[in-house]
Amino acid sequence: MKCLIFSVVSLFFYSNLHAQGSRSLGLTLKSGMSELKRISGEDDFYHPNKVTTSPSFTWGILIDAEKQFSKFISGQSQFGYNNIRGYETESYSATNAGTGETTEFRSETERNAHCLSLNTTVNIHPAEKLIIGLGISINYLLSNSYLTHGYSNNQPSYIIGGGNDLLQLDLGLNPQIGYQLFDKVKVYAGAQFGLFNIRDPKIQDSYSREFGLASGNEIILKSRLYTIGLNYTLFKDKV
């Protein structure tokens, strides 16, 4: 299924570059907030730890190809780089059976992922200069890293760094709204909602590692991006 969608998006991107009619080639710079968001994964008796996620800064740069099919409909394709970041906090407590003393544990993880994205969007132009679009994206993970700080009763206890614990391929649903500011300049506000769990199921959470559990708590992470972009038209013609 992923290969089929990749083929369709690639074909649409290629057709935008070579189609007859009004077409343009531009460059888009965007920034905003991203999150590797925990969507689900219930805590259970064997995994009483709580895992939450929060957003961080993101940015990207993309080559943009657009074809105007009619006055009201256009096709838009983008290829480029996206930086996706996010924070993950895990907390739990453990009680010493002999002394009855309870220790509070917390780990804070910052993730940084570098992705290539291929996006294709169908835009509707309901009014002059206004653009409303919905598209799909294929995101390929080049690399990712993480840095975890561990605390025991709010005192630093360890630092762990690593990477490549996220899956390489993800698909996203991309709504956007845009406005033509000037002849060659457009501004866009958009989002990207990842459709698949990108956390490698072999990766254990801190609680499972600490207590030697064979399997980790079920944690499903999906990428979320909320950005504002500025598009500059480098080339435009009518055939």
Image (cartoon, rainbow, N blue to C red):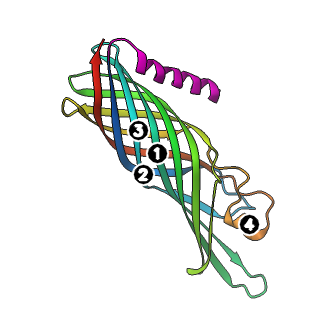
Picture quadrant of residue 187: top left
Q: Nearer the viewer, mark 4 or mark 3?
A: 3
Q: Nearer the viewer, residue 209 or 46?
A: 209
Q: CA distance from mark 4 to mark 3?
A: 39 Å
* Residues at circles 1 and 2 in contact by the CB criterion of under 8 Å: yes
Residue marked by disc 3: 62
Residue marked by disc 1: 82
Q: CA distance from mark 3 to mark 1?
A: 8 Å
Q: Main secondary structure of the magenta part?
A: helix
- Residue found 65% across the figure and 54% down from its top: 165
Q: Is residue 16 above or below residue 49?
A: above
Instruction: Label 2: state its secondary structure.
Output: strand
Residue 41, label in figure: none
Q: Report whether 170 appears left or right of 73.
A: right
Q: Amino acid at mark 3?
A: Leu
Residue 209, label in figure: 4
Q: Is residue 2 magenta?
A: yes
Instruction: Label 4: state its secondary structure.
Output: helix
User: Which comes sooner in the sequence, label 4 or label 3?
Assistant: 3
Q: Is residue 125 above or below residue 153?
A: above
Q: Nearer the viewer, residue 112 or 33?
A: 112
Horizontal and vertical percent position of residue 30: 36, 44
Q: Amino acid at mark 1?
A: Asn
Horizontal and vertical percent position of residue 13: 47, 24
User: Which comes sooner in the sequence, label 1 or label 2?
Assistant: 2
Q: Nearer the viewer, mark 1 or mark 2?
A: 1
Q: Amino acid at mark 4?
A: Arg
Horizontal and vertical percent position of residue 144: 58, 54
Q: Amino acid at mark 2?
A: Thr
